[in-house]
């Protein structure tokens, strides 16, 4: 009987000690009880709040100021023309609703044997139909418009500011008959850092009306050491008629420097190379030596304006 009583006491002591140790911890996370104050205390608190708390609140509101260094807050990453980012990487893939961007370019052939003998013009327009849908159109002509193309396209977000879908209609002439195609792309941009972004698949393939589809993927890198300047490197892979024969593959590339003095205006120049992968032994200029990829060069000056 004595041993049972002793065991019972030990159990009660253990439970009480455990409860005493655990209760403060549980109380921190548990609901807190609210007790009603006396009427006199309520009246005193109300009077004090009116005399002191109200004045303090008004003073705090008066002291609050807008920090000019803070960026403007935009819902869902969308921008207006006033808050449109200056940096190339920070801009949305599609134009925001109601914003228009115009691009004009003037270029010259600077190849070895034909430098500045021919020139070209280009023009593009983008319009934000909705916050994640844009319409675009443009034209370009080189070699005094002996080679030209014109296009119109629709682009909409699949995942906003990461990947889009683009479909359009394109006419190209100058090499043989005029060719009509339906270019399809999935414009993509990934920026692991604020100063670097990878862009790709502005065009993935094109559907020909009178032939087999062409493979036309592209990839690029945007390097932005400061919002005012950007270096843009791009390369494309063009495989007509899905024919992967080595001599049938064309790899055009470009390198551009862009300056942005404000969020409305861009200006820059772009070097273009017609084909980084020339067929072995090709001699277009007839100098008796195999051509190099840098023998076919084009220099373009461009300006973009948003309104």
Image (cartoon, grey):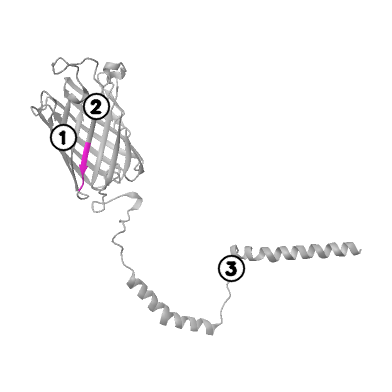
Q: Which residue is mark 3?
A: 32
Residue 269 percent coordinates (x, y): 17, 38
- The answer to which of marks 1 and 3 sits earlier in the sequence is 3
Q: Gap between marks 1 and 2, in whole Å?
A: 15 Å
Determine the secondary structure under disc 1.
Answer: strand
Q: Residue at x 47, y 81 (%)?
A: 46
Q: Which residue is mark 2?
A: 252
Q: Is residue 307 left or right of residue 38?
A: left
- The prevailing secondary structure element of the residues shown in magenta is strand
Is 259 in the magenta?
yes
| Residue 187 shows up from this direction | no
Is 153 in the magenta?
no
**Residue 155 lies in quadrant:** top left
Residue range of the region highlighted in magenta in the rendering:
256-260
Residue 189 percent coordinates (x, y): 33, 39
Q: Is residue 54 left or right of residue 103?
A: right
Q: Which residue is mark 1?
A: 300
| Residue 224 shows up from this direction | yes
């Amino acid at each position: 009987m004595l041993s049972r009583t002793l065991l019972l006491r030990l159990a009660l002591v253990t439970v009480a000690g455990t409860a005493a140790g655990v209760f403060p911890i549980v109380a921190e996370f548990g609901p807190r009880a609210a007790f009603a104050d006396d009427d006199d205390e309520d009246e005193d608190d109300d009077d004090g709040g009116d005399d002191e708390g109200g004045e303090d609140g008004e003073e705090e509101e008066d002291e609050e100021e807008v920090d000019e260094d803070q960026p403007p807050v935009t819902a869902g990453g969308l921008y207006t023309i006033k808050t449109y980012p200056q940096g190339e990487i920070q801009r949305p893939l599609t134009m925001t609703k109601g914003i228009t961007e115009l691009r004009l370019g003037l270029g010259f052939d600077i190849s070895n044997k034909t430098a500045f003998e021919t020139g070209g013009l280009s023009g593009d327009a983008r319009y934000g139909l909705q916050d994640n849908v844009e319409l675009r159109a443009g034209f370009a002509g080189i070699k005094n418009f002996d080679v030209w193309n014109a296009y119109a396209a629709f682009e909409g977000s699949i995942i906003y500011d990461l990947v889009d879908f683009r479909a359009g209609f394109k006419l190209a002439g100058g090499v043989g008959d005029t060719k009509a195609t339906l270019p399809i792309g999935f414009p993509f941009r990934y920026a692991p850092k604020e100063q670097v972004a990878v862009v790709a698949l502005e065009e993935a393939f094109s559907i020909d009306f009178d032939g087999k589809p062409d493979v036309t993927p592209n990839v690029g890198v945007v390097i932005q050491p400061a919002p005012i300047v950007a270096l843009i490197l791009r390369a494309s892979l063009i495989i007509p008629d899905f024919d992967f024969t080595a001599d049938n593959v064309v790899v055009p590339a470009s390198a551009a420097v862009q300056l942005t003095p404000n969020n409305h205006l861009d200006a820059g120049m772009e070097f273009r190379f017609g084909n980084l992968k020339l067929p072995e032994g090709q001699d277009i200029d007839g100098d008796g030596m195999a051509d190099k990829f840098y023998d076919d060069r084009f220099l373009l000056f461009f300006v973009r304006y948003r309104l």
